[in-house]
Amino acid sequence: MVRWRSGTVLSVRRSWRGAIELDVETGDGLLRALAYPALVGDPAPGDRVLLNVGALVMGLGTGGYALVVALPDRLPPDPADDGATRDSGHLVKARYTPLQPILLGVDEEASVFRKVMETAESLDGMPVITADLHSALPAILAGVHADRPSARVAYVMTDGGALPAWFSRTLDGLAGRLAGTVTTGQAFGGDLEASTVHVGLLAARHVLGADVTIVAQGPGNLGTGTTWGFSGVALGEAVNAIGVLGGRPVGSLRISDGDGRARHRGVSHHSLTAYGKVALIRADLPVPEGLEPALAAEVDAALVPLAARHRLVRVPVDGLDAALRASPVPLSTMGRKLDEDHGYFLAAAAAGRHAAALLDR
């Protein structure tokens, strides 16, 4: 459950869109903490803060912060409610937790986009790329823009990882390159809020004007090492939503020769389960050419069961390495950089390239 600490802010380390990193002195010593100003206000040196240190104590990979729960001596004012802002909505996210935000859904009556969303029924054949991990997002975007630099690409963030979009430094670094972010389900903090992936996809197309959309969870990943116990199962459900709404699903395969865990080498069991057992709609599964021979052999063998359900597409990779190296944000997955797990990022970029090619068909 929750591990509580009380401390005093010593200094502000750095900030990015929606988040502030702090040094906090506690009875356990100096801790690195993270605050979301939209939830708790703006911490300053000298403020007393209440912290949740559970993820930090457990050493979780993407949760290496003490999280600020409140500034008890300097509470933020109630948000203004002018009847047409984010705070005038009725979408409750992170529901019935102490920090549940109440937000304006893109399709709510008070939303300026209500009329657009009332008539939005189809994705009009828009290519939509699904990915298991948040780390695939910049690589997929690089693949799209390598061939179609003017393409408008939106991001639909699901709630399998971090719930606040503000946690992602990747999103902050991609500002101006994405058409926008739609946070769906329990996730929040995007440019638009949606209750479901279906609504999020329609908003990406009809509100953000996306040519291509990427669906992936926020930073972090829940997994137990069992067949069904991982948050990426939702990929298959996203493929079904894309198909129902008249989009063109493109599955980014999680490929790796750098992961030390056997279940993720070659093609990860996450991809094999989500696309092979959950997705009921036929999707394109791009397979990058140019993989190292041993990895290519592993990938080809693993994909045999998926060939009857989906369309395997071989994608040339010329120019994709350069596009990946030109990414405006660092590429990293599970602590491995581009050259430490090249196949992973190449597969994501290939999915982006294939989606861009579909715009011409």
Image: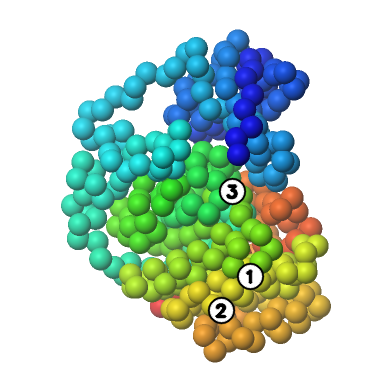
Q: Secondary structure at mark 3?
A: loop
In the rendered image of this protein, does residue 275 appear above or below residue 59? Answer: below
The residue carrying mark 1 is 227
The residue carrying mark 3 is 219
The structure residue drawn at horizontal position 54% and vertical position 66%, both measured from the top left corner, is 233
Image coordinates of residue 228 in percent, x first then y, are: 59, 68
Q: Secondary structure at mark 1?
A: loop
- Label 2 crowd (10 A; few <14 / some 14-19 / many >=20): some
Q: Is residue 263 left or right of residue 16?
A: right
**Residue 236 in view here:** yes
The residue carrying mark 2 is 276
Q: Which of the pair 252/90 is nearer the observer?
A: 90
Q: Is residue 128 left or right of residue 104?
A: right
Image coordinates of residue 66 in percent, x first then y, are: 64, 31
Q: Which mark is residue 270?
A: none
Quadrant location of the C terminus in the rendered image: bottom left
C-alpha span from label 3 to label 2: 24 Å
In the rendered image of this protein, does residue 214 appear above or below residue 35? Answer: below
